[in-house]
Image (cartoon, rainbow, N blue to C red):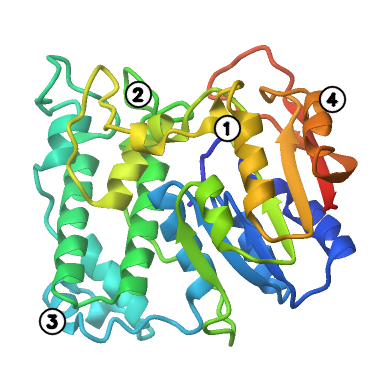
C-alpha cells in the first residue's frame, strides 16, 4: 500500500528530521501544521518528540490518528459478532491471527453492494448528474468499496468499534482503494480504460502500527492552519503548505468521500464533491502571504521550519522577504522527486527549500 499524494515528504523525512534535531531536542513539542500523509509526524513520534498534527483534509486526519495514537494493538473487542459472521478461514490458518487481522479478513469476505461508489464511479454505474459513467474503479472493486463503507459505518454507529479502530479501518480502506484506482496521479480525472492495477481485486490489508508507551502525549486536529494556529503553543512548528494551484480538496475528492463516509452530490465529468469548504488560500498566489502572517502572528512558537518547492507559486526571494518580517531566516535546500501524473517533459527532480524562521 502506498500514498499517492502531491508533495508527500516520505523521501525527505530523514533529512528534515536531521534539520529539526539541530534546532530542538527530543521531548520538545512540535506541531506538524499541515501533516498530509503524516510521514513527518511519524518520524517525530519515533524520535521522542511530543507531536500535534493538523490538516484540513479528513483523510489526513485519519492517517495522523493511526500514526500517532496507537499504543497497543487494536482488539476489536466489541466486534466479535461481525468477525464470527464473516471470518471463514480459521481452520485453514497455520497460526492463529491477531484480532486486527481477523477483522480485516472478515471485512474482505463481506458481499459486494451496488451502492454509491458503484453508481457514481464505475463503468457499469449510472451517475446522477452526467450521462457518461465514470471509470475510477472496476465495477467489482466499486461494489467492494460500497460494502466496506456500509459495514464500517454500521459498526462504528453501533459502537462495535471505537473511534480509533474506526480511524484505522478508514485508513486501511483509503490505502487499499488507492492501490486499485484507475487514475494517472490524482483523482482529478479517471483513465478511459482500466489499467493493470485497477483490475486487481481490492483487498484491505493491515497497516504496520508503530506502538509506543506514550498515551496522551500526542494530539490530532483538523482545521485551517490559520485558525488552528491560535490554539497552539509549541517549541517548533513544521509547515509544509500546498505550493501549487491544484486544490487538494478537488484533486482528492474521492478519498475525502471515503474518509467522511458520506454520499455527496457528484458533479461534472470528474464527479467532484462540493469542496469549497476546504479551499486552501495557500493555492492562491494573492492569499498566501496573509495566511502565513496569520500563522506567525497567532501561534506562540519561537521556531518555524517551512518546506517549500522551487515549483511553488512564490519564489525563494518572495518567501524570504515575507518571513523576514517576523524574524531571522536561514535557508537550506533538499532534492526531492517531482510528482508527475503524466509523461511530461519536466525533469524528474526539483529543489525543496527549508526555511528556518527564528522569531523575534
Residue 241 visible to an observer of this rendering: no
Residue 99 visible to an observer of this rendering: yes
Nearest to the observer: residue 204 or residue 152: 152
User: Where does label 2 land, which residue?
Assistant: 190
Determine the image quadrant of residue 254.
top left
Q: Secondary structure at mark 2?
A: loop
Tag nearer the camera, 1 or 2: 1
| Residue 282 tag number | 1
Whole-angstrom CA distance, mark 1 to mark 4, is 17 Å
How packed is label 3: few (under 14 Cα within 10 Å), some, or many (20 or more)? few
Q: Secondary structure at mark 3?
A: helix
Q: Earlier in the sequence, mark 3 or mark 2?
A: 3
Determine the image quadrant of residue 275.
top left
Left or right, 48 with reference to 210: right
Whole-angstrom CA distance, mark 1 to mark 3, is 46 Å
Decide: is 259 above or below 340.
below
Whole-angstrom CA distance, mark 3 to mark 4, is 60 Å
Question: Marks 3 and 4: CB-CB under 8 Å?
Answer: no
Tag nearer the camera, 1 or 3: 1
Decide: is 93 above or below 199.
below
Q: Earlier in the sequence, mark 3 or mark 4?
A: 3
Image coordinates of residue 272 in percent, x first then y, are 29, 27
Nearest to the observer: residue 49 or residue 113: 49
Decide: is 70 above or below 265.
below
User: Where does label 4 land, which residue?
Assistant: 317
Image coordinates of residue 173 in percent, x first then y, are 33, 54
Question: Marks 2 and 4: CB-CB under 8 Å?
Answer: no
User: Where does label 3 land, which residue?
Assistant: 81
Q: Secondary structure at mark 1?
A: helix
Residue at point 62%, 43% (across, down): 294
Decide: is 309 above or below 313.
below
Q: Earlier in the sequence, mark 1 or mark 2?
A: 2
Amino acid at each position: 500500500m502506498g500514498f499517492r499524494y502531491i508533495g508527500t515528504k516520505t523521501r525527505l523525512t530523514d533529512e528534515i528530521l536531521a534539520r529539526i534535531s539541530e534546532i530542538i531536542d527530543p521531548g520538545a513539542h512540535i506541531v506538524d501544521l499541515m501533516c498530509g500523509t503524516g510521514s513527518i509526524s511519524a518520524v517525530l513520534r519515533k524520535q521522542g518528540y511530543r507531536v500535534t498534527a493538523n490538516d484540513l483534509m479528513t483523510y489526513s486526519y485519519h492517517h495522523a490518528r493511526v500514526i500517532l495514537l496507537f499504543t497497543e494493538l487494536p482488539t476489536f473487542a466489541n466486534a466479535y459478532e461481525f468477525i464470527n459472521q464473516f471470518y471463514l478461514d480459521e481452520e485453514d490458518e497455520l497460526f492463529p491471527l491477531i484480532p486486527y487481522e481477523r477483522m480485516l479478513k472478515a471485512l474482505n469476505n463481506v458481499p459486494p453492494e451496488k451502492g454509491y461508489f458503484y453508481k457514481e464511479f464505475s463503468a457499469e454505474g449510472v451517475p446522477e448528474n452526467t450521462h457518461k459513467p465514470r471509470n475510477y474503479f472496476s465495477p467489482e472493486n466499486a461494489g467492494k468499496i460500497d460494502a466496506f463503507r456500509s459495514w464500517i459505518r454500521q459498526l462504528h454507529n453501533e459502537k462495535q468499534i471505537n473511534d480509533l479502530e474506526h480511524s484505522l479501518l478508514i485508513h486501511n480502506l483509503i490505502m487499499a482503494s488507492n492501490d486499485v484506482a484507475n487514475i494517472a496521479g490524482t483523482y482529478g480525472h479517471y483513465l478511459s480504460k482500466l489499467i493493470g492495477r485497477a483490475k486487481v481485486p481490492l483487498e484491505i490489508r493491515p497497516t504496520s502500527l508503530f506502538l509506543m508507551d506514550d498515551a496522551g502525549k500526542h494530539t490530532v486536529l483538523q482545521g485551517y492552519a490559520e485558525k488552528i494556529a491560535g490554539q497552539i503553543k509549541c517549541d517548533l512548528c513544521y509547515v509544509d503548505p500546498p505550493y501549487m494551484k491544484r486544490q487538494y480538496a478537488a484533486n482528492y475528492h474521492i478519498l475525502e468521500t471515503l474518509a467522511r463516509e458520506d454520499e455527496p452530490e457528484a458533479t461534472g465529468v470528474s464527479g467532484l464533491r462540493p469542496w469549497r469548504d476546504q479551499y486552501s488560500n495557500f493555492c492562491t498566489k494573492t492569499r498566501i502571504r496573509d495566511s502565513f502572517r496569520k500563522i506567525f502572528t497567532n501561534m506562540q512558537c519561537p521556531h518555524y521550519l517551512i518546506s517549500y518547492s522551487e515549483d511553488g507559486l512564490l519564489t525563494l526571494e518572495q518567501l524570504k522577504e515575507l518571513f523576514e518580517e517576523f524574524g531571522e531566516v536561514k535557508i537550506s535546500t533538499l532534492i526531492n522527486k517531482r510528482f508527475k501524473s503524466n509523461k511530461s517533459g519536466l525533469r524528474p527532480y526539483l529543489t525543496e527549500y527549508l526555511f528556518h524562521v527564528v522569531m523575534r
